[in-house]
Image: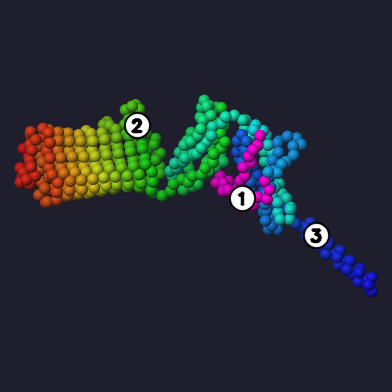
Amino acid sequence: MKFYLNMILCLLLLFIVGCSSDDSLDNLPPRDFDAKAISAGINSLSIRWTESTDPENSIVKYDIYIAKNEQNAEFVQIASALSEQQVSSPYQSDPDFRFFYKIENLEHNTQWKGKVVAVDQEGQRKESFFWTSTQEDKVVPIINNITVGSRKFYARFSVDFENSGGYKKEYIVYLNDNLIDSNGFLDNLSEGTTYNLRVQIDDGNAISDPFETSFTTLSGDVLVDDLYFVSQSQIDRFGTNRFKEIQGDVTLLIENVGQGGIQINDLSPLADIEIISGNLKIEGSHRNQEVALFPYIKQVEGDLTLFEAHLFNAFERLETVGGELDLHGCYQMDSDPIIFEKLIEIQGGLFIYQTAPRGFNKLQMTGSIHIIETGIINLDFLSELNTVSGNVFFAFNPRLTDYCGLRPLFSEGNFTGSLTIDSYDSDYFNPSIQDIIGGNCSI
């Protein structure tokens, strides 16, 4: 009886061992995945790989090996049991390659082969290989930082680097892992999209290590930035963004004599702008062409300065200037005046120099008025002034003999400042406020 009992126990033990052995044989290794080298410096290289999952839902970790790409060279393990959290690094150009590792302290100018090994909790393994070369050991330029300024459909980048003494500076640029030809400008982008930018500098002596950054193109109607336009190509390119509000200063250099004459002759690409929260300044003589500017703009929250600008149908809908309105040397405005038909408020002052504007309608001002060295003969363009809390000053206006345009302002009691007619203007006609109110305002 005891013999039979022992036989039963032995058979049961063999059955258990056999089942356990079968379970081990049934355990599958992690699934296939891909690895690749994405960049290499003098003593380092960077790799990326895709995720490997386990058929039994076991946790997978990663080992990394490297060896010289020579016959019979043995792999050396440089990292072990790397978790997903340790190596996870989003990669915009190819989201599947979301794991990253940088291998350092390598020999320069050497060909390398490597492998990433996925290991599950039962020790089952799956390998993926990569190959690359480190650079020659030269004094190389070092990139410290890359600054990217983006718009909706394009971007510019600038590189802060230390030169190694080479004879040139050429960018090697990868946008979303694609090699592109760029000297700092990136076009044909999509609105509201994040891009990965990788740049190296070739200075003719050596190539820098790659510097990676990311940026996101803008979306919406508002731009927070200062703008400075000096060429028609800038205007045309910026117009593609269709911004309605600029939160910053805007400067236009319409004609740059030192650069060979007229640079900008079409400002229609800026027609969508309705609000400028900073200053707007337009510089440069433009006397042989008529330029329509900002037909839809309603508000300039800072100063509006026109310096020797000849503009046509400008500011037709402008209602408010938050700072000073300065018209300086707009010589041809007698024939094509700047029209401010809807301008109702200037929170700063009105400064007119060598200019003959018209069209101020029901205007309220909290600053002063200065009219200097003009060819105007009357002040009819100020006849709709509603309120002026500052002073009114005239100087060097030899043809000005009619001040009756100020009579409504002075008569209605909405003027709290003083009237000054300076220099040889007073040799011709120098009425007081009471003269103007009483109708003795012209000769």
- Disc 2: CA contacts within 10 A as few (<14), some (14-19) or many (>=20): some
Percent position (x, y) of residue 286? 28, 32
Looking at marks 2 and 1 on the same chain, the residue that comes earlier in the sequence is marked by 1
Question: Which disc, if any, is residue 22?
Answer: 3
Looking at marks 3 and 1 on the same chain, the residue that comes earlier in the sequence is marked by 3
Percent position (x, y) of residue 133? 65, 35
SS label for mark 3:
helix
Q: Amino acid at mark 3?
A: Asp
| Magenta-colored span | 79-107
Which of the two residues, 4 or 25, is positioned nearer the viewer here? Answer: 4
Residues tagged 3 and 1 counted as in contact (Cβ below 8 A): no
- Disc 3: CA contacts within 10 A as few (<14), some (14-19) or many (>=20): few
Q: Amino acid at mark 2?
A: Gln
| Residue 355 position by quadrant | top left
Say whether residue 373 is left or right of residue 112: left
> What distance separates the C-alpha of mark 3 from that of mark 1?
34 Å
In reply to whether residue 40 is colored magenta, the answer given is no
**Foreground disc of the pair 2, 3:** 3
SS label for mark 1:
helix
Question: Which disc, if any, is residue 86?
Answer: 1
Q: Name which residue lies at 35% across and 27% down.
A: 259
Question: Which disc, if any, is residue 263?
Answer: 2
Say whether residue 173 is left or right of residue 433: right
Quarter of the picture containing the C terminus is top left
Q: Amino acid at mark 1?
A: Gln
